[in-house]
């Protein structure tokens, strides 16, 4: 089938403002991913088109973009998955709320600044066991934060959040998910510090429970639920 990609293009070194570029492709299969089509545009029609991707299998989280107005990983979206038919147009834009570097590539530094701010690493609550073995954790204790271990830091959630669009100072759902993973780990000893960080004005209370983040997550993490659990933990610690 024939499909047109309408791609938001912008090179800050040469363009006054963004514009739409239309690229029509023949021989598109229902099993083709959006990423495969973008590759065809870049390799067959316009080598200047700029994107970020790595694994092409939904693991690295590097090709988040807006596909027909919704945040997606381009490699995980197939033509038949979004009901594309012969003659259709697919609209592609960079994710919102982060500065565009070029075309579909945004600057992730503000996003990672928020990530780093929540102490997204294990802080042992106890010294290593004397027998040299691992710290024991029950299955039930592990299940409390199992969901949030799946995050691949793709930013689909944070850049779909209207609170983040309104203020880039909001730490955002991805950082809260990462904090959740350690706050609720029974072996970790820094939950209080993380909760204090997230209780700041630009922390969890900027979440207005808009819920855009949950359907945006390509890992099916219950993002809003995780945020709610962190809010509750802050209240209980007061
Ligand atoms: Fe991506 Fe989901 Fe992690 Fe958000 S929570 S960064 S959408 S994987
Ligand atoms: Fe934003 Fe998700 Fe909260 S969309 S407002 S972080 S529920
Ligand atoms: Fe790695 Fe899509 S390229 S998640």
Image (cartoon, rainbow, N blue to C red):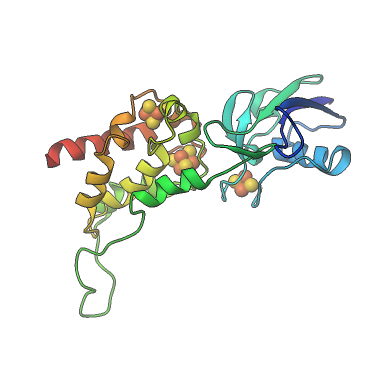
Whether 223 is drawn above or below 83: the answer is below
User: Which residue corresponds to the image point at 63% horizontal and 33% vertical from the top-left?
Assistant: 94
Residue 33, quarter of the rendered image: top right
Left or right placement of residue 205 versus residue 212 in this view: left
For this orientation, the residue located farthest to the bottom is 131
Q: Position of residue 182 (x, y in %)?
A: 30, 52
Left or right placement of residue 7 versus residue 227 in this view: right
State the residue in front, 132 or 188. 188
Left or right placement of residue 86 versus residue 154 in this view: right
Does any portion of residue 174 appear in the rendered image? yes
Whether 66 is drawn above or below 52: the answer is above
Does any portion of residue 57 appear in the rendered image? no
Whether 32 is drawn above or below 145: the answer is above
Q: Position of residue 195 (x, y in %)?
A: 23, 45
Q: Position of residue 45 (x, y in %)?
A: 87, 37
State the residue in front, 204 or 146. 204
Q: Position of residue 238 (x, y in %)?
A: 11, 39
How many circles with numbers are drawn on the protein? 0
Residue 7, quarter of the rendered image: top right
State the residue in front, 98 or 81. 98
State the residue in front, 8 or 214. 8
For this orientation, the residue located farthest to the left is 238
**Looking at the figure, which quarter contains the N terminus?**
top right
User: Which residue corresponds to the image point at 72% horizontal and 24% vertical from the top-left?
Assistant: 90
């Amino acid at each position: 089938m024939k499909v047109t990609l309408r791609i938001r293009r912008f090179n800050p070194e040469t363009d006054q403002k963004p514009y739409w570029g239309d690229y029509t492709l023949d021989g598109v299969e229902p099993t083709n991913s959006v990423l495969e089509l973008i590759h065809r545009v870049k390799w067959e029609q316009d080598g200047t088109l700029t994107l970020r991707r790595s694994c092409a299998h939904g693991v690295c989280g590097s090709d988040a973009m807006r596909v027909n107005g919704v945040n997606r990983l381009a490699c995980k979206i197939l033509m038949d998955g979004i009901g594309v038919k012969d003659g259709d147009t697919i609209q592609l834009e960079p994710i919102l709320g982060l500065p565009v570097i070029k075309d579909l590539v945004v600057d992730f530094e503000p996003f990672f600044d928020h990530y780093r701010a929540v102490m997204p690493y294990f802080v042992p609550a106890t010294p290593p066991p004397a027998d040299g073995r691992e710290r024991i954790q029950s299955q039930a204790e592990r299940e409390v934060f199992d969901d949030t271990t799946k995050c691949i830091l793709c930013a689909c959630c944070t850049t779909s959040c209207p609170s983040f669009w309104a203020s880039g100072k909001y730490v955002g759902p991805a950082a809260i998910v990462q904090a959740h993973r350690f706050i609720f780990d029974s072996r970790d000893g820094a939950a209080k510090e993380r909760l204090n960080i997230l209780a700041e004005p630009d922390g969890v209370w900027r979440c207005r429970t808009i819920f855009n983040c949950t359907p945006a997550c390509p890992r099916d993490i219950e993002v809003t639920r995780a945020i709610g659990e962190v809010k509750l933990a802050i209240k209980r610690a007061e």
